[in-house]
Image (spheres, rainbow, N blue to C red):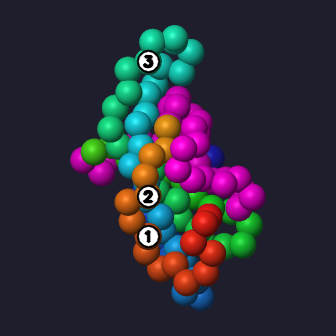
Amino acid sequence: MQLESFGKPQSLPNASGTTVKEWNALYTTQITQKAKKFHDGFLRLSVCGSYMDQVTLLNEEGVVLGSKYVKSSEFIKTGKTFELLNYLVEIFELRAVEGSKTNPEI
């Protein structure tokens, strides 16, 4: 199975309650090294349903570096460290929220 597209999730016809949150983040590919070199980017969380959410890592220019589906119970928030395939991401301040009507602390 091959994933052809990353980025914002495709909107479903009946999914009117999609919430998208973005955080400033630092990321590195040097997961196992002691001295890591971090790069600026941002992390996007798309809450599409009640069970799975999509987390996307983007660089400063908005190019998608990686994406992963996580369970809704896995909290992505400021101050946490998150691991994507080949990337270690440190999450900083919240920079944008779109479409949020309930539960601002996801």
Q: Is residue 71 left or right of residue 31?
A: right
Tell me if mark 2 has few (under 14), some (14-19) or many (20+) residues whose alpha carbon lies within 10 angstroms of its own.
some
Q: From the viewer's perspective, is residue 14 above or below residue 37?
A: below
Mark 1 and mark 2: Cα distance apart in space = 8 Å
Q: Earlier in the sequence, mark 1 or mark 3?
A: 3
Residue 72, by quadrant, is bottom right
Q: From the viewer's perspective, is residue 69 above or below residue 8?
A: above
Q: Position of residue 26 (x, y in %)?
A: 41, 37
| Magenta highlight on residue 66 | yes
Numbered disc in front, either 2 or 3:
2
Tell me if mark 1 has few (under 14), some (14-19) or many (20+) residues whose alpha carbon lies within 10 angstroms of its own.
some
Q: Looking at the rendered structure, which numbered label has been put on residue 36? A: 3
Amino acid type for the residue under numbered disc 1: Val
Dividing the image into 4 quarters, which one contains the C terminus? bottom right
Q: From the viewer's perspective, is residue 76 above or below residue 38?
A: below
- Write down the region rendered in magenta: 61-89
Amino acid type for the residue under numbered disc 2: Leu
| Residue plotted at (43% across, 34% down) | 27
Q: Looking at the rendered structure, which numbered label has been put on residue 94? A: 2
Q: Earlier in the sequence, mark 2 or mark 3?
A: 3
Find disc 1 in the rendering and name its residue: 97
Q: From the viewer's perspective, is residue 27 above or below residue 98?
A: above
Q: Callout 1: helix, strand or loop? A: strand
